[in-house]
Image: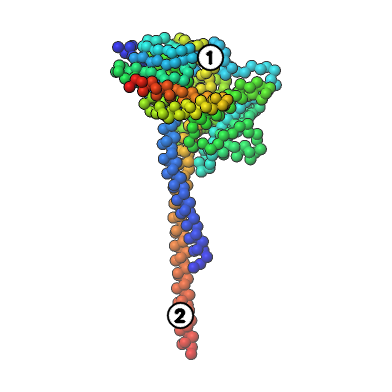
């Protein structure tokens, strides 16, 4: 057997096994995404109710809460902004992580252009690796749950963010918090989005609320201050929770698509390789026949000469 | 009359725990127990771990829900109980909840008063209260 033929066979075998892997990953992603989408939908009522409550307090109370108004520390030489971005723990997700990272990088340069110092918080191993590879400082990072986040993960992240936000500027506290997550628009489109987490932007919540309820004159018990104090951490947690779930669903959708095209590509490759292999085998056979015929005629010629 | 029923929704981080129409809702806020009847004024209040009681429109059925803190918001005959971890009493085993509570209590007694233990304690406490209440009613 010729070396070319053997090589082609080897390549076809290896592509076949790659195809098996990508096919399996595609199927796994497809089954996981149903769960992830379900979780994202399940969390919606909670987020919606909290949005509604925050909107009610924000529109009603005049009492300024440290989390609803911009930090006012005029003597601070420059503002400090926290940037948290959500990526995946593993590759094979197509452009999912790099899209989020790109958006985060753009956001970071925009913040720097505004004269702000940027502190980075990374969720997911890909984001951590990206920062570590570029020797960028990571304030805090979390990983290991990118495709199936738990509420506890959201709480840990949110607590850290709130803690850093409430710290005074001199002690390294941040003045605003931006989040980059990937929104799951549909199975086909997932878009990275930038949202300001703190100080509060209640725009998202207000859109869903009909003016009737928003203007209702709420009574606060015991008082607006206590209610807001309790409400804000819950609200931030639910935002982070929402981002985590959206990102997880996007990641899986992106993975499914990437693996689907990898599988298709592998199939095409296998087809091409099989053709080449057949051709190589055929030409080898032809050559052998030629050799035999040549050998036989040489033999008969030499016998005739005798 | 539509005005005389409440629409109640109990939501937690993992989803909607219960929703439906009700005649009244009783929950415990930081200020004490609060009873909500139809046409209650809009209110937003902080809850403490408790067993909330929802009297459904059928009149005979009570839904007991374990609430580990969070909020109650009332507006336009719409009541929302918002709690990070809420659970229906039906789905709680009193025995397990008590064991959890004892564990959390022990941790607290040992001077372990970080957030994690406190949350654990609150959650277990709410579940025990709810399970007891449901058990007593049956």
Chain bearing mark 2: A
Q: Nearer the viewer, mark 1 or mark 2?
A: 1
* Classed neighbour count for the residue bearing mark 2: other residues with Cα under 10 Å, few (<14), some (14–19), many (≥20): few
B57 vs A125: above or below: above
* Classed neighbour count for the residue bearing mark 1: other residues with Cα under 10 Å, few (<14), some (14–19), many (≥20): some
Picture coordinates of residue B4, whole percent (x, y): 33, 11
Q: Residue at x 40, y 27 (%)?
A: B94
Q: Residue at x 54, y 33 (%)?
A: A86
Q: Which residue is mark 1?
A: A226
Q: Are marks 1 and 2 on the same chain?
A: yes
Residue A253 bears which disc, if any? Answer: none
Residue situated in front as seen by the camera: B66 or A122: B66
Q: Which residue is mark 2?
A: A296
Question: In the structure shown, which secondary structural element does the residue marked by tag 1 occupy?
Answer: helix
Real-space Cα separation, disc 1 to disc 2, in angstroms: 104 Å
Q: Residue at x 41, y 40 (%)?
A: A31
């Amino acid at each position: 057997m010729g070396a070319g033929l053997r090589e082609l066979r080897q390549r076809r075998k290896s592509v076949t096994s790659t195809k098996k892997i990508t096919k399996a990953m595609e199927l796994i992603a497809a089954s996981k995404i149903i769960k992830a989408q379900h979780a994202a939908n399940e969390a919606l009522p909670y987020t919606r109710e909290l949005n509604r409550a925050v909107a009610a307090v924000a529109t009603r109370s005049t009492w300024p809460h440290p989390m609803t108004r911009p930090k006012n520390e005029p003597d601070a030489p420059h503002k400090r902004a926290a940037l948290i971005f959500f990526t995946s723990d593993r590759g094979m997700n197509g452009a999912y992580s790099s899209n989020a990272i790109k958006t985060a990088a753009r956001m970071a340069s925009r913040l720097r252009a505004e004269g702000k110092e940027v502190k980075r918080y990374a969720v997911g191993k890909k984001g951590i690796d990206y920062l570590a590879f570029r020797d960028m400082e990571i304030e805090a990072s979390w990983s290991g749950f990118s495709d199936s986040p738990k509420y506890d993960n959201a709480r840990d992240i949110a607590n850290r963010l709130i803690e850093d936000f409430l710290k005074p500027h001199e002690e390294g506290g941040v003045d605003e918090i931006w989040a980059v997550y990937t929104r799951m628009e549909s199975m086909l489109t997932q878009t990275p989005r930038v949202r300001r987490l703190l100080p509060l932007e209640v725009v998202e919540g207000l859109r869903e609320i009909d003016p009737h309820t928003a203007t209702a004159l709420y009574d606060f018990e015991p008082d607006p201050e206590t209610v807001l104090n309790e409400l804000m951490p819950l609200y931030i947690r639910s935002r982070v929770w929402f981002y985590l779930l959206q990102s997880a669903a996007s990641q899986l959708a992106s993975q499914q698509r990437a693996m689907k095209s990898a599988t298709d590509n592998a199939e095409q490759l296998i087809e091409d390789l099989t053709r080449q292999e057949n051709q190589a085998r055929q030409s080898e056979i032809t050559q052998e026949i030629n050799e035999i015929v040549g050998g036989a005629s040489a033999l008969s010629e030499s016998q005739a000469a005798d | 009359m539509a005005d005389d029923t409440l629409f109640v929704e109990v939501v937690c981080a993992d989803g909607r725990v219960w929703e439906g129409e009700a005649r009244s809702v009783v929950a415990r806020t930081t200020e004490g127990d609060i009873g909500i009847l139809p046409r209650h004024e809009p209110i937003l209040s902080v809850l403490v771990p408790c067993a909330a009681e929802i009297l459904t429109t059928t009149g005979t059925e009570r839904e007991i829900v374990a609430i580990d803190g969070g909020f109650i918001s009332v507006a336009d005959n719409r009541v929302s109980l918002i709690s990070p971890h809420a659970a229906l009493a039906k789905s709680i085993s009193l025995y397990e909840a008590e064991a959890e509570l004892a564990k959390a209590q022990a941790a607290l007694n040992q001077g372990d008063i970080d957030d994690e233990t406190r949350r654990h304690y609150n959650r277990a406490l709410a579940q025990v209260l709810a399970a007891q209440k449901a058990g007593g009613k049956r």
